[in-house]
Amino acid sequence: MSTGPAGHVARSAIRPNSETHGAPRGGTSLRTFLCTADGVRIDSVYESAAVSAAAGNNGFRPPSREPVFVIAHGFTGHADRPHVRRVARAFARHGAVVTFSFRGHGASGGRSTVGDREVLDLAAAVSWARELGHARVATVGFSMGGSVVLRHAALDAGGAGGAGGPDAVVSVSGPARWFYRGTAPMRRLHWLVTRPSGRLVGRYGLRTRIHRRDWDPVPLSPVEAVPRLAPTPLLVVHGDRDGYFPLDHPRMLAAAAGEHGELWVEPGMGHAENAVSDGLLHRIGDWVVARAG
């Protein structure tokens, strides 16, 4: 499961989608399948900013001054999960939003590689956001998605939004290193990913189709990726009651980021999208608007 370079993105005909859950009232909502550089079809949703809709801007092309939040969900999530829709609604108060389902999740094609080739899925979503007219793009990832946004930004040769990469990066509840098994939830996750019986549970119980092959080569770890983001602004958010990754993970990421990174340790917060509060989402939204150019 090696990661190739993100190439040009081909997409199917875009169609208005007035029924997308959580779409800002009066705003533009589009749903389509994007094609990644390695040929996987990715179910993707665009929603214009609630602030633009309130101002009467209901056209297809959004104003370039508005940021767009590209949301990378956690493992076993997808674009229509209630917690992903809640995140999208919160960020729509600060800018436009792109949500998508990683490969092997929801209606997207392919099989999950649990953070490896998912950088190509994110690259397709970021490219689409820029094609829609947004000059400022922020990537916000949760858990597995938190590791993907770090690697995606690190692999962008231009940096700081240059070659289509992000202008700001937020990693929420993400790991610092691979193969961590120090908590019971992570031991269960490794069983789900590595055992045939676990992958059956993932496919039929969690709507997640998991690739059976091991990583070859092992991709760049999140903590190795972080120094390569500079000077792109980075925010690391983690709960002090995260049951998957203890606090040494975000602290390692923050230390690797140096001056271009910030760390928020949130009291009482658990893991990823389910645990993040609306208030915290709005604080993240404010941070992105201030940092993304």
Image (tube, rainbow, N blue to C red):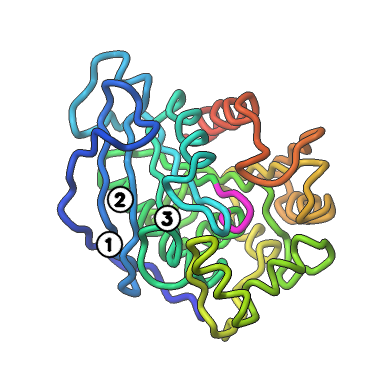
Disc 3 residue crowd, few under 14, some 14–19, many 20+, Cα 10 Å = many
Disc 1 residue crowd, few under 14, some 14–19, many 20+, Cα 10 Å = many
In this rendering, the answer to whether 187 lies above or below 241 is: below
Instruction: Tell me the tag on residue 128.
Output: 2
Query: Which label's residue is closer to the chain start, 3 or 2?
Result: 3
User: In front: mark 3 or mark 1?
Assistant: 3
List the residue tagged with mark 3. 101
Q: CA distance from mark 1 to mark 2?
A: 8 Å
What SS does tag 1 mark?
A: loop
The region drawn magenta spans 141-145
Residue type at tag 3: Ser
In this rendering, the answer to whether 203 lies above or below 60 is: below
Disc 2 residue crowd, few under 14, some 14–19, many 20+, Cα 10 Å = many
Residue type at tag 2: Trp
Which residue is pictured at 32% across the width and 14% down the height? Answer: 54
Query: Which label's residue is closer to the chain start, 1 or 2?
Result: 1
List the residue tagged with mark 1. 9
Q: In this image, 227 relative to 38: left or right? A: right
Residue type at tag 1: Val
User: Are the residues flagged by discs 1 and 2 in contact, CB closer than 8 Å?
Assistant: yes
Query: Which label's residue is closer to the chain start, 3 or 1?
Result: 1
